[in-house]
Amino acid sequence: MDITTALAPAEATSPSPVDADMVKDVVSGLSATQKFLPSRWFYDDEGSRLFQKIMIMPSYYPSRVEHEILVRRAQDLVRWIAPSSGEVDLIELGCGDGTKTVSLCTALHDAGVPLAFHAIDVSAHALAELSTRFKHELPQVAVHALRGDYFQRWPSVYALRKQVAMFLGSNIGNLPIAQAIGLLKRIRSRLKRGDLLLLGVDLQKDPRAVLAAYNDVEGVTAQFNLNLLSRLNRELGMNFDLTAFRHYACYSPIDGAARSFLVSTVEQTVRSTQLARTFHFRAGETIYTEQSQKYTFDTVEELAASGGFTVCDHITDAREWYSISVLGAH
Ligand code: AVI
């Protein structure tokens, strides 16, 4: 197996004490009329550990159903990815530890598709696990691990080979619409006509099932949400009292958005030594921390068109709870 781990220069050094983007987001988010903190800051080590826990909870169906589609509908995906005998570069944005994709790569390999797998992720730890997984389970496939932010990085590939990009995990749903379109356009600009993007999207369904996924009785999503405040305490010298905030999740079938908030249970002022700022909270005031968009086939089509793609197919589970939508670069 050929494993190339390319470290982005800025990421190869130890993290700087204060992240300038985080400072910008926190100052603007906590000064806004409707306070907000972007969900990208959830994923420090503890946040990633809690998200792993969420993914195996019975109420959190998206990861389970997506995995089921990747396994049960692998042959349909193989037919789209490799309708003829040419070589394919499979490029996964935000690959994690490879659990999602190893079964699809196995199906492609078993179908005799000449394949190179380019795995992009910010986490060196996840990439190391992915490399080990492929070494044990599928040593015949060349894995190129690329560490970095998928908003910026792209592997070097041969211009003539077919490229199939993958953005799974329903991660598109966490991006504000302008950013989601921006990401699709960026991916499109790297592809040529006839290449594909496989996009994992969570579909609209019984609102009670959606709400249960973000409002689990075990309280793991609450811990995941509150961990954001622990992170800001640690990294920006803030003094959030975690017992004075509560997780609140809601789902609106009108716009298909599941939203998470942290509610201040009392009137309070939070300080940051690093920022030399204070932020005031009324009792009951909320910080909007995450949007998880749920789609219909129509809204996937609108999103795809805005990003420069056409929808070729929606590969779903039997209940149509989730779709790996096949988008064609035209
Ligand atoms: C990573 N992302 C797709 C998850 C979601 O469903 O929006 C994050 C998550 N938030 C709460 N539970 C899971």
Image (spheres, rainbow, N blue to C red):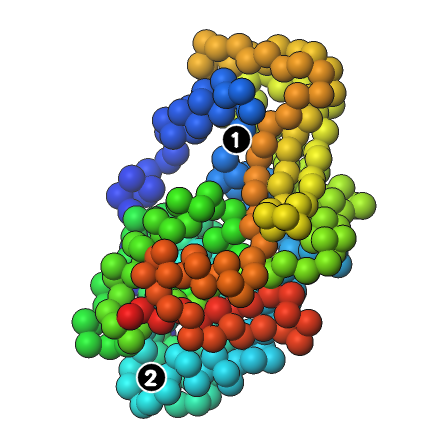
Q: Residue type at mark 2? A: Pro
Nearer to me, 203 or 53: 203
Q: Residue type at mark 1? A: Leu
Q: Earlier in the sequence, mark 2 or mark 1?
A: 1
Q: Which residue is mark 2?
A: 114
Give the secondary structure at mark 2.
loop
**What is the number of the mark on residue 53?**
none
Q: Is residue 2 visible?
A: no
**What is the number of the mark on residue 37?**
1
Q: Quadrant of the N terminus?
A: bottom left
Extreme-left residue of the structure: 159
Residue sitting at x 71%, y 21%: 284
Q: Residue 99 placed where, x, y %?
A: 54, 66
C-alpha span from label 2 to label 1? 43 Å
Q: Residue 330 placed where, x, y %?
A: 29, 70
Nearer to me, 189 or 234: 189
Nearer to me, 245 or 292: 292
**216 sits left or right of 292 in the view:** right
Q: Nearer the viewer, mark 2 or mark 1?
A: 1
Q: Quadrant of residue 19?
A: top left
Nearer to me, 164 or 208: 208
Q: Are marks 2 and 1 in contact (CB under 8 Å)?
A: no
Relative to 238, residue 156 above or below: below
**246 sits left or right of 19 in the view:** right
Q: Is residue 272 visible?
A: yes
